[in-house]
Structure formats: C-alpha cells, structure tokens
Image: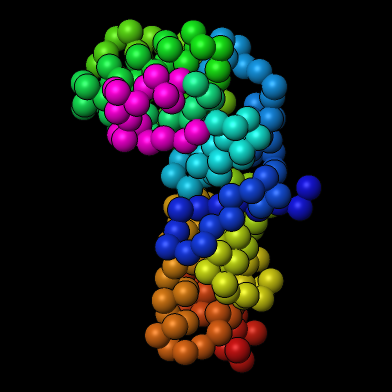
Amino acid sequence: MATQLSFDLPSKTALGREDFFVSPANALAVAMISATSWPGNKLVLSGPAGSGKTHLAHVWAAETGGRIVQASALRYDEVPDLARAPVAVEDVPVIATDAEQQKTLFHLHNLILAEGHALLMTGRAAPKLWQLPLADLQSRVEGAHHVALEAPDDALLGAVLAKLFTDRQLNPGPDVIAYLVKHMDRSFEAAAQVVEQLDNIALTEKRDITRALAVRLLNTEPEQSDVRN
C-alpha cells in the first residue's frame, strides 16, 4: 500500500485510505479501523495532534457509511438522526467543561449502540485521562476498546513530511526530507510547523525549498554541501 498521512492544514488535504502511510507506529490503529466489528461496537482512537486521527476517522466513515461530528458541535435534537448510522465523534475531551455536551454525547452513545451501529471517539490522550465530569459518560468511554497512534518512527515521519509538502503543492528534494527527519523535533506538530515555515520562507524569498534552507531554519551547523546550495 503506497501511503501517507494527512493533517489539518490551510491547503487541500487528501483523506483517502491510499493517502495514509502505514508503519509500526500506527499499524495497530489502522487494523482496528479496518476491523468489521469492535468489542461492544465502540472504539476510542487516541494520538497527538496531527497523528492521523481525523484521517482514519474519514477512512472509517467512507468505508462504513458513517458520519463525522465534532464533540463540541453535537446537538441534542440531532441525536436521533445521527444514531441511524455509524458515527465518529472527534475531540471528545474538549467537552469536559460543557455539561450539556456531555449529556448529549451520553445520549448519543446509548442510542447508537441500541440501534446496532458503531461509535468511534477520538482524543489526544488515553480515555482514562479525559476526565469527563459526567461519571456515566466517563465510565462508558473507558469501557470502549482503545487503540493509540504512537510517536512517529523515521519512515512515518518522512511520509508525514512528504504528505505535508504535497498538500501545499511543494516538491522539495529527497535530501530535504532526509535532513529534516534526522534533525527536527520528532513530533507531528513539529512536522506541520516546519513545513509551514519552510513554505513561508520560500514564498517570501522567492526560492526553492532546499537542504540549505532547512539547515538555516533548524539552526543546525551547515555542512560543506549546504554552503554550495
């Protein structure tokens, strides 16, 4: 499977299965999203910002005919309609300070399972850390099967960077990505920031994105080959 990972950036982001890069850091999560059923018909998918939760939610929704909704956008009167199909509720921990939203999600949780459909919930941390004040909701969240997207390995981080550049219609040389993988902070958020910064610098200075530019951005010691670029 030729694959890459997507991020929520101000550009056109591809969210198909063929665009998702599979590595040991996310293989278990991909397998669970692809499963025909989950224990109790519900799953929690966790991972840091930009790790692919939204991408996998879209893959799952496309394959199951499901719908995707932000936890903060849930409306109580819309729950019966939502519960007619599988549903992915994103960023559940953000409603920890909203009692009404928690009641709405609790109602959706119960109704959608009663209707025999699947419920996918996402958040950055493990569900036991979501600390939802509505105890009945928190217990049901913790009762869901949980799978986490792990920190990126070299292959995944390289694919993330390639995808981020592609989404911005940028085509840096392979030496740029190799250099970034070796020297940047190893996180998905850092990858998004680095690509955005390189894009901005290249636009401002009307130049290509080169290894030398990456060296400059990361404030690392340039090698002789960089000086000639």
Front residue (pair 223, 69): 69
- Quarter of image, res 22: top right
> Does the stretch in magenta take in 81?
yes
Residue 41 to residue 10: above or below: above
Count of numbered labels shown in the rendering: 0
Q: Residue at point 42% right, 10% down? A: 110
| Residue 196 visible here | yes
Query: Residue 115, how many percent across, how many down?
Result: 51, 12
Residue 180 to residue 45: above or below: below
Query: Residue 199, how many percent across, how many down?
Result: 47, 74
Query: Residue 41, how many percent across, how many down?
Result: 57, 14
- Quarter of image, res 106: top left
Residue 82 to residue 213: above or below: above
Q: Which residues are magenta?
A: 67-83
Front residue (pair 150, 111): 111
Q: Residue at point 62% right, 17% down? A: 38
